[in-house]
Image (cartoon, rainbow, N blue to C red):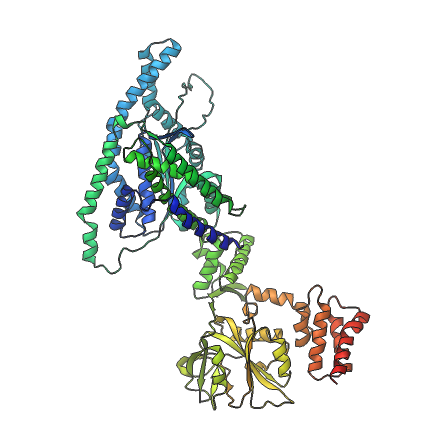
C-alpha cells in the first residue's frame, strides 16, 4: 500500500471509530469563546480558535495548581502546550489580545495582587516549621530566611516570551516557595526565535509530564551560596505561535522545528493550523461594523472574565480532581485505540507515531482543565469526551503541519506558476530557501522535477548566452471526451475552434472538403504566428514508407484513430494516425518542432518532417477507411517534452540507439533481460510483413543483432529466430 493511501486509510478508520470516545459537542466555554473570536475576527476557522481558548484554560487551571488524582496514575498536573501556526489574516493577534485583556486579565490581576501573596506567606510558614523541626532552629528565623530568598528571586512574572534556563529555575523556585503559580511561556513567531529559545524548549520538554526538572550542580562559595533545594512540581504551559512561511523555510529553521517534534513536542503539544475563512463575503461594511461592536460578544466575554476572576481564590489552590474508575477505563480504551492506530503507521514515521500514540495523555490533562473551570472535584466522562473531541481536532491540524509543502514542492509550483522564464537570480530573490550551495540547489531542482512529474507539473531548462533559464507549467490531463481542434472550408481563414469526443473524430476526417488542425488560432486565421498554446493530440503522416497493418500491430497497445488519405493504395500505404496525449501541452514553435522530432525518433517508422509545425493542417477525406484502437495506453508524452529532465533521461537512455533505424530502435528499446530472442523474432516478422524475402530478412536480422550491446551468438540466432522466420514463410508462401 502506498504511503499516501495508507495515511488516508488510517484517517478514515479514526473518524469512524472516534464516535465511541468523542462528545458530540465541545466544552461550552470553549465553544462560546470560539464563537466570539470567530465573530470578532470575521474568520470562521473555529478549530484554530478552540486551541487558543484551550491554552488559556490551561494557564488558569495550572496557575491554581489543579491536578488529576487517580489510583493508576497518581497525581498529574493540569498543564498544556500548544503550537499554533497561521498566516496573516487569521486574526491571531486580535484574538489573543481579546483573550488576555477581556477574559484573563481579571484572573491575572487578582492572582498576582491577592492570591499569591496570601498563599506565599502561608506556604513559607509551613516550610519554616518543617525546616525548624529538621534543624532544631527557630521558626521565625527560618521564615525570615525563606522570605529573603523569596524577595531575591524577583517579581513574579505571569508569562514571558524569552528567557534563560537559570531564570526559569529561579521562577520555579519562587513558585515552590509560594506553593502556587505556573510558568507560562508564550513565543510569537517561532520561525524567527527558534535558535534563541533552544535551551528553554529543551527544559520545557522535561517539565511537561510532572513539572519536574533536574538542578544544575554549582560550587558553593561565599559569593554563590547553594540554597536548600525545594522538592515539588511546578506546572508549565507553553504557546508557540508561528507563520508557516517563516517556519517552513526549507532550511535550518524548518529542520530545527521538525527536530523539536521528533524529540518530544509532537506528543506533548496541541496543534492549530489557521486558515483565513471569511465569515461572509456578502456582508456590507455596515453589517460588519455591527458585528464587531455587538454587545452580545462583550457580555459573553465579561461572563467568562468574571468566572475566571472568581477562580483566583486561595481556597481553590491545589484543586484536586479525582478520577473515578469508569473515567479511567474510558481513558485506557482511548489510549489503546491511539496506540493501535499508531501501529498501522510505517516504522519510519516516528513523529506521526509519537503524536498519535500519546493523544490520550493530552486529552487527559485537557479534561482536567475542563473540570477545574467547572469547579468539579471529580472528572466526568463528559469532560474526557469533550477533551478527546478537541484533541482529535488538534491531531488533524498536526497532520496538516506534518504534510506541509516541502521546499522542492514550493519550487516546482513557483516555476510552473510564475508565467515566465526565471533565472537562478530570480529564484534567489523570490524564494528564501533557495539561497543554498550550488550542489544543494541542483538537488532541489532535481527533486522538484521528480515531484512535479507525479503532480502533472513539468519543469523546463534552457541555456541562453550561458545563463540557465527555468520555466514550467501545470499540466491538465486529457479528457477523451474533449479533444480540441479547429476546422475550416478555407485553406487559411475562418478556422472554427471545436471540442469533440475522440471516438467521434472519424466524423471530422471523413467530412467532405474541410481542412483541420490540432491547434486553435488567433482570430481564427491559420498561421504559425497565430497558433494558440494548447493541444491534446498529435497527428502522424505516413506516406508509403511503412505498411499500415504493421503500424496497427506495433501500436496496438495505444489508443489511436488511423485512416487512409486520398493517395492511399493497397500497394503504397498512405495514412494518418491520430494519437490522443495523456496531457495537454503548451509549446512554442521551436519546442513543438523538437517535441515532434522526439516523437518521430521513437516511432518504428519515419514521418514527414513537414508536419512538425503547429500550424500544419490536414485535408479531410470522405472516402477514408478508418479504424480505432482500444488499446490500454494513452500516449505518455512527458519523456518527449524538450528541456525537461525526463526528456534528458530518455535521450541519454537511447543515445546508444542513435545509429539504428526507426524500426530497429523500436525493438532495441524494448529489449530487456531474457527477451532478446522474442524482440528479434518480432523484428524479423515485421520485416516479413513488409514484403521482404528471406535472404533480405536474414541480412537485416544479422545486422541488427550485431549492433546490440549484448548480441545473440550467430548460431543461436540462426537456430531460433531465422528458423522461425523460415518456417512461417513456408507456411504462408
Question: 462 or 8: which is nearer to us?
Answer: 8
Question: Eyeballing the image, is 188 above or below 683?
Answer: above
Question: 689 or 87: which is nearer to us?
Answer: 689
The quarter of the displayed image where residue 379 is located? top left
Question: Eyeballing the image, is 503 above or below 236?
Answer: below
Q: Residue furthest front?
A: 326
In the picture, measured across the screen, residue 535 lies left or right of residue 138, that is right
In the picture, measured across the screen, residue 318 lies left or right of residue 462, that is left
The quarter of the displayed image where residue 603 is located? bottom right
| Quarter occupied by the N terminus | bottom right
Residue at position x 54%, y 70% from top? 637
Q: Is residue 271 visible?
A: no
Q: Is residue 369 visible?
A: yes
Q: Residue 676 at what x, y percent from top left?
A: 72, 68
Q: Residue furthest top?
A: 136
Q: Residue 664 at what x, y percent from top left?
A: 69, 74
In the picture, measured across the screen, residue 17 lies left or right of residue 653, that is left
Amino acid at each position: 500500500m502506498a504511503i499516501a493511501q495508507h495515511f488516508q486509510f488510517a484517517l478514515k478508520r479514526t473518524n469512524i471509530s472516534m464516535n465511541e470516545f468523542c462528545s458530540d459537542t465541545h466544552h461550552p466555554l470553549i465553544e462560546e469563546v470560539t464563537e466570539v473570536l470567530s465573530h470578532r475576527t470575521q474568520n470562521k476557522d473555529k478549530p484554530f480558535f478552540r486551541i487558543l481558548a484551550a491554552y488559556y484554560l490551561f494557564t488558569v487551571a495550572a496557575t491554581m495548581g489543579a491536578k488529576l488524582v487517580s489510583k493508576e496514575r497518581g497525581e498529574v498536573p493540569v498543564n498544556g502546550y500548544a503550537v499554533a501556526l497561521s498566516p496573516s489574516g487569521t486574526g491571531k493577534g486580535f484574538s489573543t489580545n481579546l483573550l488576555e485583556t477581556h477574559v484573563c486579565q481579571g484572573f491575572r490581576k487578582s492572582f498576582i495582587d491577592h492570591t499569591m501573596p496570601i498563599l506565599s506567606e502561608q506556604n513559607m510558614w509551613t516550610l519554616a516549621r518543617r525546616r525548624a523541626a529538621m534543624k532544631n532552629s527557630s521558626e521565625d528565623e527560618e521564615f525570615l530566611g525563606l522570605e529573603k530568598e523569596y524577595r531575591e528571586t524577583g517579581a513574579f512574572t505571569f508569562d514571558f516570551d524569552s528567557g534563560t534556563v537559570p531564570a526559569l529555575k529561579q521562577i520555579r523556585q519562587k513558585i515552590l516557595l509560594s506553593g502556587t503559580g505556573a510558568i507560562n511561556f508564550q513565543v510569537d513567531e517561532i520561525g524567527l526565535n527558534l535558535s534563541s529559545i533552544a535551551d528553554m524548549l529543551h527544559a520545557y520538554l522535561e517539565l511537561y509530564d510532572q513539572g519536574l526538572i533536574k538542578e544544575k550542580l554549582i560550587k558553593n562559595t561565599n559569593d554563590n551560596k547553594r540554597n536548600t533545594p525545594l522538592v515539588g512540581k511546578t506546572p508549565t504551559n507553553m504557546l508557540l505561535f508561528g507563520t508557516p512561511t517563516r517556519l517552513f523555510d526549507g532550511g535550518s529553521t524548518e529542520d530545527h522545528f521538525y527536530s523539536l517534534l521528533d524529540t518530544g513536542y509532537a506528543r506533548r503539544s496541541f496543534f492549530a493550523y489557521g486558515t483565513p475563512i471569511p465569515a461572509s463575503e456578502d456582508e456590507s461594511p455596515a453589517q460588519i461594523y455591527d458585528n464587531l461592536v455587538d454587545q452580545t460578544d462583550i457580555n459573553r466575554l465579561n461572563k467568562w472574565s468574571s468566572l475566571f476572576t472568581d477562580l483566583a481564590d486561595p481556597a481553590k489552590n491545589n484543586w484536586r480532581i479525582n478520577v473515578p474508575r469508569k473515567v479511567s477505563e474510558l481513558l485506557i480504551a482511548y489510549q489503546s485505540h491511539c496506540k493501535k492506530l499508531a501501529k498501522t503507521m510505517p516504522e519510519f514515521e516516528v513523529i506521526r507515531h509519537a503524536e498519535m500514540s500519546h493523544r490520550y495523555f493530552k486529552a487527559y490533562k485537557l479534561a482536567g482543565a475542563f473540570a477545574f473551570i467547572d469547579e468539579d472535584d471529580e472528572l466526568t466522562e463528559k469532560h474526557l469526551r469533550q477533551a478527546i473531541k478537541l484533541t482529535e481536532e488538534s491531531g488533524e491540524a498536526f497532520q496538516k503541519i506534518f504534510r506541509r509543502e516541502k521546499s522542492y514542492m514550493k519550487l516546482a509550483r513557483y516555476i510552473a506558476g510564475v508565467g515566465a522564464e526565471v533565472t537562478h537570480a530570480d529564484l534567489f530573490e523570490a524564494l528564501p530557501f533557495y539561497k543554498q550551495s550550488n550542489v544543494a540547489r541542483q538537488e532541489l531542482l532535481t527533486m522538484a522535477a521528480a515531484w512535479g512529474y507525479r503532480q502533472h507539473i513539468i519543469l523546463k531548462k534552457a541555456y541562453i548566452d550561458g545563463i540557465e533559464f527555468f520555466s514550467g507549467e501545470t499540466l491538465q490531463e486529457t479528457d477523451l471526451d474533449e479533444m480540441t481542434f479547429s476546422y475550416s472550408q478555407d485553406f487559411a481563414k475562418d478556422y472554427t475552434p471545436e471540442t469533440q469526443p475522440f471516438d467521434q473524430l472519424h466524423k471530422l476526417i471523413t467530412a467532405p472538403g474541410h481542412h483541420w488542425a490540432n491547434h486553435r488560432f488567433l482570430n481564427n486565421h491559420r498561421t504559425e504566428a497565430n497558433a494558440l498554446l494548447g493541444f491534446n493530440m498529435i497527428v502522424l503522416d505516413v506516406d508509403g514508407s511503412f505498411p499500415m497493418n504493421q503500424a496497427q500491430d506495433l501500436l496496438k497497445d495505444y489508443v489511436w484513430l488511423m485512416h487512409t488519405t486520398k493517395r492511399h493504395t493497397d500497394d503504397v500505404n498512405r495514412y494518418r494516425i491520430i494519437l490522443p496525449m495523456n496531457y495537454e501541452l503548451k509549446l512554442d514553435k521551436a519546442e513543438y518542432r523538437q517535441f515532434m522530432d522526439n516523437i518521430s525518433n521513437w516511432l518504428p517508422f519515419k514521418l514527414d518532417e513537414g508536419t512538425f509545425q503547429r500550424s500544419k493542417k490536414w485535408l479531410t477525406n470522405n472516402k477514408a477507411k478508418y479504424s480505432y484502437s482500444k488499446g490500454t495506453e494513452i500516449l505518455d508524452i512527458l519523456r518527449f517534452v524538450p528541456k525537461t529532465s525526463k526528456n534528458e533521461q530518455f535521450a541519454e537512455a537511447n543515445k546508444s540507439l542513435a545509429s539504428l533505424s526507426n524500426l530497429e530502435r523500436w525493438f532495441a528499446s524494448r529489449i530487456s533481460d531474457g527477451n532478446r530472442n522474442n524482440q528479434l523474432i518480432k523484428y524479423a516478422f515485421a520485416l516479413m510483413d513488409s514484403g521482404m524475402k528471406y535472404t533480405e530478412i536474414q541480412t537485416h536480422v544479422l545486422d541488427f543483432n550485431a549492433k546490440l550491446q549484448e548480441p545473440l551468438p550467430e548460431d543461436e540466432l540462426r537456430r531460433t529466430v531465422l528458423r522461425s522466420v523460415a518456417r512461417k514463410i513456408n507456411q504462408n508462401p
